[in-house]
Image (tube, rainbow, N blue to C red):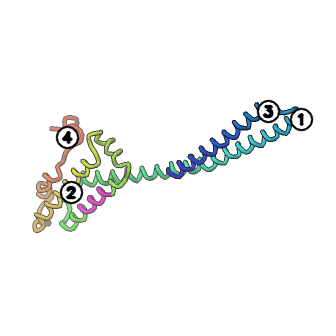
């Protein structure tokens, strides 16, 4: 976007200079009424000026339009990547308890590390706060989300470390019970509106 902005500034400056030249020429012609024999020469000069100005405008549009299209395409790609990264991070943490409950200790460590990685990846994008606002509203900031998600990941890691000797012997239900405090199953929709509400 910076390249397009700098090109646009240059085009604006050149346009201002050309407009100033046009105003000077117009004032000169108005103040020094030319003789009838100079009118064809002045008409030729005016036609040349129009041609140069039109060529400049077409040339600048030929530069600006492709640059703007390229910038827009690149920005769209970045937003798409950002959205995917946020989705992976959020979904990874939302389903972390189930994945950990169904995995061995070695697999659980890898799953936890993957969720932590996706969390950091999502936070690297400039659009990350946009996705948070769309999902949670203005009350959720990037710092607050980071704090909540890091807390969940840290506590889940702590559960794994504290139960490392027993983890592979526990049933999935027992693992879920151990993970329940660190990875609570909470709905973002009020429970009374869910079909599974008591």
Q: Which disc is residue 153 wearing?
A: 2
Q: Earlier in the sequence, mark 1 or mark 3?
A: 3
| Quarter-of-image position of residue 48 | top right
Mark-to-mark CA distance, 1 and 4? 94 Å
Q: Is the residue marked by circle 3 packed among few (<14), some (14-19), or many (20+) residues within 10 Å?
A: few
The kind of secondary structure element at disc 3 is loop
Mark-to-mark CA distance, 1 and 3? 14 Å
The kind of secondary structure element at disc 4 is loop
Judging by the rendered image, the residue that carries numbered circle 1 is 37
Q: Which disc is residue 32 wearing?
A: 3
Boundaries of the magenta span: 112-120
**Do the numbered discs 2 and 3 sit on residues whose CB atoms are within 8 Å?**
no
Mark-to-mark CA distance, 2 and 3? 82 Å
The residue at 29%/56% (across/down) is 119
Tell me the chief SS of the magenta region.
helix
**Do the numbered discs 1 and 3 sit on residues whose CB atoms are within 8 Å?**
no
The residue at 46%/49% (across/down) is 76
Q: Is the residue marked by circle 1 packed among few (<14), some (14-19), or many (20+) residues within 10 Å?
A: few
Query: Looking at the image, is 168 positioned above or below residue 68?
Result: below
Mark-to-mark CA distance, 1 and 2? 88 Å
- Choose mark 2 or mark 4, whichever is in front: 2
**Do the numbered discs 1 and 4 sit on residues whose CB atoms are within 8 Å?**
no
Judging by the rendered image, the residue that carries numbered circle 4 is 196
Q: Earlier in the sequence, mark 1 or mark 4?
A: 1
């Amino acid at each position: 976007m910076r390249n397009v902005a700098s090109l646009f500034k240059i085009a604006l400056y050149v346009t201002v200079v050309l407009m100033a030249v046009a105003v000077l020429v117009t004032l000169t012609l108005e103040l020094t009424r030319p003789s009838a024999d100079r009118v064809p020469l002045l008409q030729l000069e005016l036609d040349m000026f129009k041609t140069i100005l039109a060529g400049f405008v077409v040339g600048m549009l030929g530069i600006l339009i492709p640059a703007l299209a390229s910038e827009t395409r690149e920005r769209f790609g970045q937003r798409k990547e950002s959205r995917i990264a946020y989705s992976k991070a959020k979904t990874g943490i939302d389903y972390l308890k189930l994945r950990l409950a169904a995995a061995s200790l070695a697999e659980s460590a890898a799953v936890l590390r993957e969720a932590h990685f996706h969390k950091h990846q999502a936070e690297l994008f400039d659009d990350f706060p946009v996705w948070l606002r769309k999902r949670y509203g203005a009350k959720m900031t990037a710092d607050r989300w980071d704090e909540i998600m890091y807390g969940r990941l840290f506590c889940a890691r702590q559960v794994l470390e504290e139960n490392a000797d027993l983890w592979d012997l526990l049933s999935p239900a027992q693992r879920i019970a151990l993970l329940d405090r660190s990875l609570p199953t909470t709905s973002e929709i009020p429970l009374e509106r869910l079909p599974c509400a008591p």
